[in-house]
Structures are given as C-alpha cells and as structure tokens.
Amino acid sequence: MDKKVEQQLEKLIAGFCDYEMIFYPRSALDGQRAILEFHFEGITEQTQKMERLIIVRKGKAMEIEIAKSSEMKYEYGDFRHQVEEGEPIRNRLRGDEEVILIVRSEFSTKPKGPHISTKVIEVYEH
C-alpha cells in the first residue's frame, strides 16, 4: 500500500496509527463474510466489537456502507438478545478494488479489569 493511500486512511480512521495492520492475499477474503457489530452487557462485563469496510479504487480510499450483521445481548435488566443478519461483502465489491480493508475495533471491560482494547486492520490486496 502506498503512502498516498495511507494518508487517506489516516483521515478516514480515527487513531489510525494505533491499529495493527495484518496483510492477506486477496484470495483469502471470504466474500460471504458480513461486517460485524456486536454489543454485550452482562453483570460483570461489557464488550463491543465494531467493523467497517473500506476499499481502494483508482488510488482513492472510501468507506462502503453495508448492512452489518448486528447482535445485541443483555444478561441483566431486560435480558434482550437481538440478532440481525448482515449483507455479504461480495454484494458491494465490483472486482476492480486494489485493496479491501476490514477495520475492527474491540473493547471489553470488567469492574476490576482487565480492560482490553484491540484495533486491527485486515488488508486484502493482490
């Protein structure tokens, strides 16, 4: 990935320098995969996981709006468990993408710790 694209990503992704980048060949991308959004609240734990789909076409990085696979689960209070199916990534890809990125941030906290924060960018390119 060139510097110009990285500069564009810095503008799209807050805290870009805090993310770990993992590179994969384009063939490793599962087109059936959905972008995830997960929220869990229990008596002693809270967890959030958010993903975003960003692609690079003709040297320009852009975020793609896509129906996310969403799950909300509460294990106290109203005990809700709500699941919504997301849209497969392949529905939004045209085949002319130079780079496909899945930006994932996770945060988990417990009253006495540890608090865990993970920030990963999966980069799929030729």
Image (cartoon, rainbow, N blue to C red):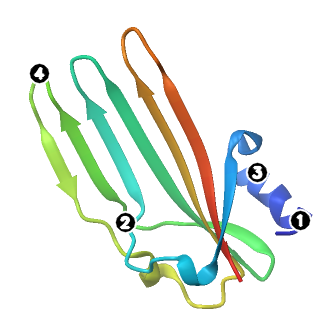
Which residue is disc 2 drawn over?
67
- Amino acid at the residue labelled 3: Lys
Q: Nearer the viewer, mark 4 or mark 3?
A: 4
Question: As drawn, is 31 to the left or to the right of 17?
Answer: left
Q: Nearer the viewer, mark 2 or mark 4?
A: 4
The mark that comes first in sequence, 1 or 2, is 1
Which residue is disc 3 drawn over?
11
Which residue appears farthest toward the top when viewing the image?
A: 112
- Amino acid at the residue labelled 4: Gly
At label 1, counting other C-alpha atoms closer than 10 Å, the crowd grade (few under 14, some 14-19, many 20 or more) is few
Which residue is disc 1 drawn over?
4
Question: As drawn, is 98 to the left or to the right of 5?
Answer: left
- Helix, strand, or loop for circle 3? helix
- Amino acid at the residue labelled 1: Lys
Q: Quadrant of the C terminus?
A: bottom right
- Residue at the image position 63 percent from the left and 55 percent from the top: 121
The mark that comes first in sequence, 3 or 2, is 3
Residue 115 in the image: x percent, y percent?
Answer: 48, 21
Question: Is 1 or 114 nearer to us in this picture?
Answer: 114
The mark that comes first in sequence, 1 or 3, is 1
Residue 39 in the image: x percent, y percent?
Answer: 32, 39
Which residue is disc 4 drawn over?
77
- Residue at the image position 38 percent from the left and 67 percent from the top: 34
Marks 1/3: CA–CA distance = 11 Å
- Helix, strand, or loop for circle 1? helix
Marks 2/4: CA–CA distance = 28 Å
Residue 66 in the image: x percent, y percent?
Answer: 43, 68
Marks 1/2: CA–CA distance = 29 Å
- Amino acid at the residue labelled 2: Ala
